[in-house]
Amino acid sequence: GSKLSSYTFKDNVLQEDINTSDYYIRENATLLMLVRNWELAGALHSMRSLEDRFNRNYHYDWVFMNDVPFTDEFIEATSAMASGNAYHVLIPSSDWDTPEWIDKDLYEKRLEVMNQTNVLYGGSKSYRNMCRFNSGFFFRQEILSNYDYYFRVEPEVEYFCDFPYDPFKVMREGGKNNGFVITLREYEETIPSLWEFVEEYIDIDDGRDIHMDSNSHKFITDDDIVGNNKAIYVSNNAYNMCHFWTNFEIGDLNFFRSDEYIRFFEFLDSKGGFYYERWGDAPIHSIAASLLLDKDEVVHFDELGYKHDPYYTCPSAYYMFLKQRCQCNASSETNLDLHTLSCLRRWWKHGSGKNFMRFTTS
Ligand code: GDP
Ligand code: MN
């Protein structure tokens, strides 16, 4: 087995603790990448970064998913880069393609309008299939029935720091269902009527799946806005556009597979907004987490440096920065946490701040 170093607090002093046990019990978890064959170089870039900063000590599996068969070259290269097992699966077309009940004329009309308005991926059909797949179908793929947790990875991302812990262990030991590193505001033009439907869903649910007293709905609604972002909030009813960026996401598959989440997804999916608008999987996951989970079930991994263009996050605690051998600039304007676009301060106020447990070793 591999030797692991981790951090622990003793008498309130952060100390390095070398775990010298002979073996390490992994969590029931996998690294997960949805990816296209032509993105091989970017996939390897992300893999190398995550392997070096985390997985080379743990050897978690990698699962790759694609809506067309992977090429031999892709399979060979990613399997070689992985320190754990690598699996490559084909997504059935019934889980990827645009469903029959979508009104084709209306869809084409909406695509054309969005295409003319500079909305990112506004005219793309494959992007819409991808967002719907990532919202309602990735967790139902057969191979994932073997796992409890997944860590979503995308091509061309970077992890700036050594991981000071196994995030899967943080998830399980802390009873977390969803973990993020970056939170920001969504482009409103992509979800003009999403919140209307969410409100309809909240009405129908009538407290069955949604527990307003313990969830983090205040994180995504606009009760007490200050500063110059006001215009962004008020124009789309009560949703403030805050969401967790899902290109980095660590989640409990059992949450997504639950009746609660499936009911939420099926209701929204039936409205057609993944196609008639351009709903992203990030606001869908985030609204679900903020409504269906207790706030303590969501965790902000604030020690992990991460970049997905055009934004990044870099640990601001200087000791951790050095200890984790980070390569990023925490004080730069491009560190999203310092930016008005970031929802992090809102998370600190309305989400969960109970993170201390992650430093304990067992
Ligand atoms: P962005 O991060 O929103 O700019 O979108 P990306 O282009 O990075 O897509 C998000 C994720 O979905 C990435 O992991 C892509 O590799 C993957 N992806 C996007 N479109 C497709 C597609 O048509 N087929 C497959 N197999 N993967 C896709
Ligand atoms: Mn991406």
Image (cartoon, rainbow, N blue to C red):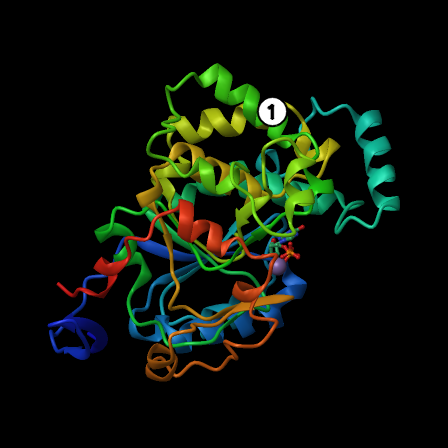
Indicate the quadrant containing the C terminus: top left, top right, bottom left or bottom right. bottom left
Q: In the drawing, does residue 259 fall left or right of residue 22?
A: right
Q: Is residue 107 above or below residue 352?
A: above
Of the pair 237 and 243, the residue shown nearer to us: 237
Of the pair 175 and 275, the residue shown nearer to us: 175
Mark 1 surroundings: few (<14), some (14-19) or many (≥20) residues within 10 A = some
Residue 60 spot, x, y in % from top left: 34, 63
When asked about the image quadrant of residue 214, the answer is: top left
Q: Is residue 60 visible?
A: yes
Residue sitting at 25 percent across and 46 percent down?
A: 175
Q: In the drawing, does residue 286 fall left or right of residue 355?
A: right
Q: Is residue 129 above or below residue 169?
A: above
Residue 137 spot, x, y in % from top left: 52, 38
Residue sitting at 26 percent across and 56 percent down?
A: 27
Q: Is residue 147 visible?
A: no
Write down the residue under mark 1: 197
Q: In the drawing, does residue 161 fall left or right of residue 129?
A: left
Mark 1, secondary structure of its residue: helix
When asked about the image quadrant of residue 208, the answer is: top left
Q: Quadrant of ligand 2?
A: bottom right
Indicate the quadrant containing the N terminus: top left, top right, bottom left or bottom right. bottom left
Residue 340 spot, x, y in % from top left: 60, 58
Q: Is residue 299 above or below residue 339?
A: above
Residue sitting at 37 percent across and 31 percent down?
A: 258
Of the pair 67 and 102, the residue shown nearer to us: 102
